[in-house]
Amino acid sequence: MASEEYSSRTWRVTRYRVTHAFAKVREVYTKAPPRTTAHDPVDPPVPADLLNLLCRLGVALVGAGETSARVQLILDKLSRRYGTDNIHFMVLPTAVFVRVRTDNTSFLDMLDARVGTLPLDQIDGLYRLIDRIEQDAPPPSRASDDLATILTQKPGSPRWLILLGQVVLTVGIGMMLNPGARALVGYVVLGLVVGALTQLADKVKLLSMALPVVASAVVAILAYGFPGALAGGQPQQLLIPAVATLLPGAMLTNGTIELATGSMVAGASRVVYGINMLFLLALGSYVGISLLGPLSDPPVSHAQLGWWAPIVGVLLIGCGHSWRSSAPQNTVGWLLLVLYITFAAQLVGKHVSGPLTGAFFGGVVAVNAAYLIQGRKHAPPTQVAFLPAFWMLVPGGISLTGISDLVAHSLSGVASGGLEVLVSALLSVMSIALGVMVGSGLATAHTPRVGTIIDTVVPRHLPWHHAESATDKSDSDS
């Protein structure tokens, strides 16, 4: 009896313990897990308005035609000016990445960039803002507002002047490359047509995407459809000047420089984009010539304008580019000075060893000339003075000329050496890029010494300015 009572009590205790254990387990597993509250957003160690300013400045510098390495260098300098040394940048042709690194974590910000080049007046305002930041370090929010004002301002040139600049620029490039007397009418007509298409593309998105093909097709139709009236029987002379503003010279040259300096992602993307643009232009020429059917052989006029034509052409290039790209006021004289110096160097190089040497000399001298005028009265920033001279070199011209010749010969059943065309294109771009790299190295290494020499030739203030200031000082003393 006692054993039965003991067994019953033991069973009750065991059952209680087991039931209590199951209850504990059920309570633990059925109770909702504690909600992990998201951490409150932690502000980066660098102010958000400074990160925003640096991102926007990087995108603007990409639009100003700077290489990725140069943009990173400028952004590093500006970030240190604001007292930060833990910001790292990665610049691509289509985006700028900013990373802030701390001991425990890191923060990343980015801003996409559009493909294209800013007008010269906006580039001028951008670099003057950068100079002001380096000198005074204004609050980032105020600098961002100033940058937004610069980038949203309307072009300094009205639309009719931009169109006129396109025509004058086309005529100038034509007179410098192919100074045929009968081709002047074609340069004017095709410059007007391409300028009108470019302005229309700013309003029609579909046309802007197909602008290289449409523009080169229309140019080819007009040039080869009316070879006697527009080109004196040599329609191929009209192709390059007419579409010169669409050539991807900056993309190809900057891409080659970036590949040479180790920026492989940025350089490869630029080179691929430039080559794709060249083939789109060639495709447009092919379509335009194909629509005309069999080509006729009009009488060829060999009348040339004379030795003075390239000299006048450089003048027209300077004026046309200034109007088309809205150059700042009082800077046209300096732009023309850089253009003529670059043209002289290119001419000397051609006479010494051929076109490739001329392209190299032009690239070297263009950079140094732009650096040397920096700081003179009414002189533009270096990039503003350099870009027109850079475009005068037409770094993609040989490529498109060769491809257009291939198109024309293929339509007429004549074989042509495609390998020679590609090699010529590559060597031309590499000559420009090498010249720009060497010129940049010389300019940054010897600017103080050369600047002293230039001060003796082109003083910062003319003598009568000193006389006026002395007179004002004597009047104030009296």
Image (cartoon, rainbow, N blue to C red):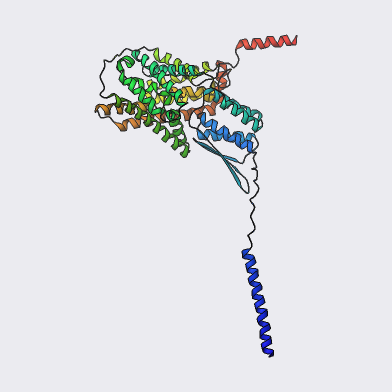
Give the quarter of the figure containing the C terminus: top right
Residue lying furthest bottom in this view? 1
Is 28 left or right of 341, judged from the image as shown? right
Relative to 422, is 38 above or below?
A: below
Q: Is residue 130 something one can see in this rendering?
A: no
Q: Nearer the viewer, residue 324 or 106?
A: 324
Relative to 432, is 230 above or below?
A: above
Q: Position of residue 165 (x, y in %)?
A: 46, 17
Residue 355 sits in quarter: top left
Residue at left offset 45%, top offset 15%: 315
Q: Nearer the viewer, residue 413 or 159?
A: 159
Residue at left offset 31%, top offset 21%: 224
Is 76 left or right of 436, judged from the image as shown? right
Q: Nearer the viewer, residue 306 or 348?
A: 306
The number of numbered discs placed on residues in the rendered structure image is 0
Q: Position of residue 265 (x, y in %)?
A: 46, 39
Is 103 left or right of 354, judged from the image as shown? right
Q: Is residue 225 something one can see in this rendering?
A: yes
Q: Position of residue 433 (x, y in %)?
A: 44, 30
Residue 351 sits in quarter: top left
Is 184 left or right of 103, judged from the image as shown? left
Residue at left offset 65%, top offset 35%: 82
Give the quarter of the figure containing the N terminus: bottom right
